[in-house]
Amino acid sequence: MTAKPAHLNFGETNVELPVIDAAIGPSVVDIGKLYAKTGLFTYDPGFTSTAACESAITYIDGDQGVLLYRGYPIEQLAEHGDFLETCYLLLNGKLPTVAEKEDFVGRVTHHTMIHEQMSRFFQGFRRDAHPMAVMVGCVGALSAFYHDSLDIEDPYQRMVASIRMIAKMPTIAAHAYKYTIGQPFIYPTNSLDYTTNFLKMCFAVPCEEYKPNPVLSRALDRIFILHADHEQNASTSTVRLAGSSGANPFACIAAGIACLWGPAHGGANEAALKMLEEIGTVDRIPHFIAKAKDKNDPFRLMGFGHRVYKNYDPRAKIMQKTCHEVLKELGIKDDPLLDVAMELERIALSDPYFIEKKLYPNIDFYSGITLKALGFPTSMFTVLFALARTVGWIAQWAEMIQDPAQKIGRPRQIYTGPTQRDYVPITARR
Ligand code: CMC
């Protein structure tokens, strides 16, 4: 604690509040003792100015458009690294050596199968269930299958649970997809890398040989890197809040998946693609821009805007490049959706409404087009986000468990309901 304290005057009381400096980014006023000293709570819906924890995992500078995982810029990791290396980095705080990486990849690879009983668990869902609904159920159900990694006080069990989730998430996601389209589940292939194995489990069928495409595998692997963590967003905060009660890691990650599903968060990639399809042609863009600007119209440009980024989302730039690479590899020269997206981006970025509100494309703007080109239906987009974000959730959960300052999350409120009143017998009520 090096910074000068802050002072709050309230009536006759002057309270000194410690200020804690961050390694980079804004310092924070420690208000932990505010209620004890003044009887006041603070009010900050949506946590727009409130830090809920200390974290050494991910840093975002929303004004500059910077995203660092453990200090490394996202651009460098996406260009030179791979997803499992990024997982190791997020979990362990350092990039692995050759031997460490080999060991980590080996452990993940040998945990990719799911309990056979669990494969049958899928049959209980309706065929038309949204795969995110299946994910919430199946990931939560992992805690019913892996009893030997539920003790959150045991570092070894925490590590095993982490490896299991990173390893099994592609298998569960691919099963969720196969189930909805009525095709047989494809078992993992340990000779393939993480992402190619996932693509195979999604797109292979038993009657044909599956031929991996390294360009597409690399593109999806990069998409996974981009989604791996994003500091204290809604789903990560959900995981931390669930974990703060001592709930087991599988249950916490299932809670994160449920939160991610919403269209303001992970569901935005699905919503962005649906919006581009609804716009359909470039000449209809002005109509939708006008709707987005109309205060009386709830319509928003999906894939635009971000709580933290008030500049171009650095992930969106990489995603745009990846999108072009995927379309080129697949020989898609004229994708009308891409035309609409690029023109929409151009118009929005020169429109005073979007400029003044600092609304830039976010990661979800181009991810939908890319994932669609890779062959995924829109309902799977958020599932892929969940798959990739699992490592971030686990890293944040593990950091919280080991934080000596950790206590159960328990926000306060401003009560606005009736004050105390007496029960009235039903016959006497008006
Ligand atoms: N289109 C039109 N206007 C917008 C948009 C948009 N996409 N986003 C924000 N605004 C306006 C909003 O109407 C408000 O205007 P005013 O100040 O006049 O009331 C102003 O910009 C600030 O918006 P806000 O809702 O207070 O900002 P927020 O930080 O609470 O919301 C957001 C952030 C991402 C939920 C929001 O920008 C949004 O709904 N975007 C569309 C959904 C989307 O793309 N979500 C993906 C986020 S990135 C992936 C992830 O992290 O999950």
Image (spheres, grey):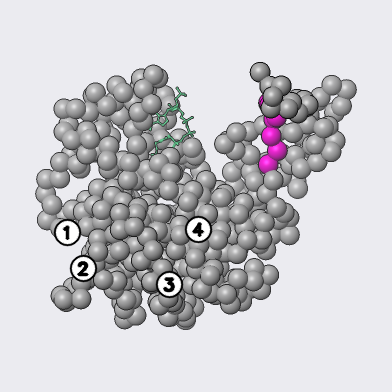
Judge from the rendering whether residue 317 lies leftward or rightward of residue 60; answer left or right: left
Mark 4 touching mark 1, by CB under 8 A? Answer: no
Q: Secondary structure at mark 2?
A: loop
Residue drawn at the location 69% of the way across and 30% of the way down = 414
Q: Give the structural element (helix, strand or loop) at label 1.
A: helix
Query: How far apart are the two marked residues, 1 and 3, measured between alpha carbons?
Result: 36 Å
Mark 2: which amino acid? Answer: Asn
In this rendering, which labeled residue sits more in front, label 2 or label 4? 4
Marks 2 and 1 in Cβ contact (< 8 Å): yes
Q: In the figure, 344 relative to 352: above or below?
A: below
Q: Quadrant of ligand 1?
A: top left
| Crowding at mark 2 (Cα within 10 Å: few <14, some 14-19, many 20+) | few
Image location of residue 149, percent across then percent down: 58, 74
- Crowding near the residue tagged with mark 4, few <14, some 14–19, many ≥20 C-alpha atoms within 10 Å: many
Residue 329 — which label?
1
Q: Earlier in the sequence, mark 2 or mark 3?
A: 3
Question: Which comes sooner in the sequence, label 4 or label 1?
Answer: 4
Q: Residues within 10 Å of mark 1 (few under 14, many from 20)?
A: few
Pointer 2: what residue?
213
Give residue 342's position: percent from left, percent from top: 23, 38
Which disc is residue 254 wearing?
4
State the image quarter where residue 152 is shown.
bottom right
The local secondary structure at tag 3 comes to: helix
Q: Which residues are magenta?
A: 411-417
Query: Residue 297: x percent and y percent?
Result: 36, 22
Q: How far is the residue under mark 2 from the one under mark 4?
A: 31 Å
Please identify the dominant SS of the magenta region.
Answer: loop
